[in-house]
Image (spheres, grey):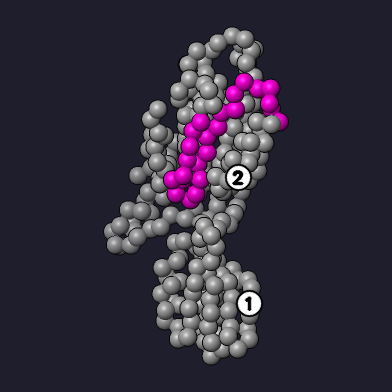
């Protein structure tokens, strides 16, 4: 077994437990990389993002800022599952730009990240192998300059309960170390709590066992995120070619 994550999964399988992965790697802020070849410049910019709307805004802004560039190629992957992704060649030959960018995102097991590579043409064609190397190398440089963080997928629930149920609710909140906000302890008590995705089933079971207490999920997307530290975590062995757990493979051209 290559790592502790896989070992934990096997131990859970032996106990008939289900592991819901709710931690993943991302970046804490913007970073930049650069690659030059035969007069062409490839400026890679990496951004932490959590929605496709953010992606559109950033790409649009960069196209205005670097309006004199030949290409603005990009790729992104979103969510704790990493199941929302796209690679865009922006006029470069098919799969010569967006796919190498996404490949570097995936080789570093990252999500909630956008990388845009801005190309200034130097007058000499690089060929498809040269383009792949340029977009791959510039993206790798941007990622290497980023601060890698670990994020936890959360859901937000609004608890509503009677005054007599308050002690039971507060005990549950304390036992599960739930983050609270928006408390209202009037005649009809309520509060908002954030629950780790891996603890959601336990949370809902506990709520169901408290008389006069309900939990309603809040938020448009349902998933919220909490940064727990800024130290990179090895999710899989570098000696293994296994893809990041939960990631869809890079799409074929």
The residue at the point 64 percent across, 73 percent down is 182
Residue in front for this viewpoint, 88 or 151: 88
The quarter of the picture where residue 237 lies is top left
* Image location (x, y in percent) of residue 137: 55, 24
Which mark is drawn over residue 54? 2
Asked if the magenta segment contains residue 230, the reply would be no
Give the residue at x 63% y 77%: 183
Relative image position of residue 109 (x, y in whole percent): 48, 41
Quadrant position of the N terminus in the picture:
top left
Residue 97 seen in the current view: yes
Residue bearing the label numbered 1: 183
Q: Is residue 216 above or below residue 246?
A: below
Q: Is residue 74 magenta?
A: yes
How far apart, in angstroms, are the residues tagged by discs 2 and 1?
A: 31 Å
Instruction: Name the spot of residue 54 as percent of width and height, x first.
Output: 60, 45
Quadrant assignment for the C terminus:
top left
| Crowding at mark 1 (Cα within 10 Å: few <14, some 14-19, many 20+) | some
Q: Secondary structure at mark 2?
A: helix
The span shown in magenta is 65-88
Instruction: Identify the residue at horizontal 52%, vertical 57% (top origin).
Output: 221
- Residue 18 in which image quadrant: bottom left
């Amino acid at each position: 077994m290559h790592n502790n994550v896989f070992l934990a999964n096997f131990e859970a399988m032996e106990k008939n437990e289900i592991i819901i992965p709710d931690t993943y790697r991302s970046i804490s802020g913007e970073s930049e990389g650069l690659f030059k070849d035969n007069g062409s410049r490839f400026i890679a910019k990496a951004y932490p993002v959590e929605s496709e709307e953010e992606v559109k805004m950033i790409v649009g802004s960069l196209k205005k800022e670097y309006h004199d560039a030949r290409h603005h190629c990009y790729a992104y992957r979103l969510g704790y599952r990493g199941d929302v992704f796209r690679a865009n060649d922006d006029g470069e030959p098919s799969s010569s730009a967006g796919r190498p960018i996404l490949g570097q995102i995936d080789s570093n097991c990252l999500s909630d990240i956008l990388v845009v590579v801005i190309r200034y043409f130097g007058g000499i064609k690089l060929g498809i192998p040269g383009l792949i190397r340029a977009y791959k190398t510039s993206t790798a440089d941007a990622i290497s300059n980023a601060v890698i963080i670990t994020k936890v997928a959360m859901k937000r629930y609004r608890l509503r309960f009677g005054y007599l149920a308050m002690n039971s609710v507060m005990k549950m909140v304390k036992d599960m170390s739930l983050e609270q906000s928006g408390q209202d302890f009037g005649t009809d008590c309520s509060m908002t709590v954030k629950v780790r995705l891996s603890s959601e089933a336990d949370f809902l079971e506990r709520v169901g066992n408290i008389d006069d207490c309900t939990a309603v999920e809040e938020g448009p997307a349902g998933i919220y995120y909490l940064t727990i530290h800024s130290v990179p975590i090895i999710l899989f062995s570098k000696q293994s070619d296994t893809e990041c757990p939960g990631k869809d493979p890079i799409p074929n051209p």
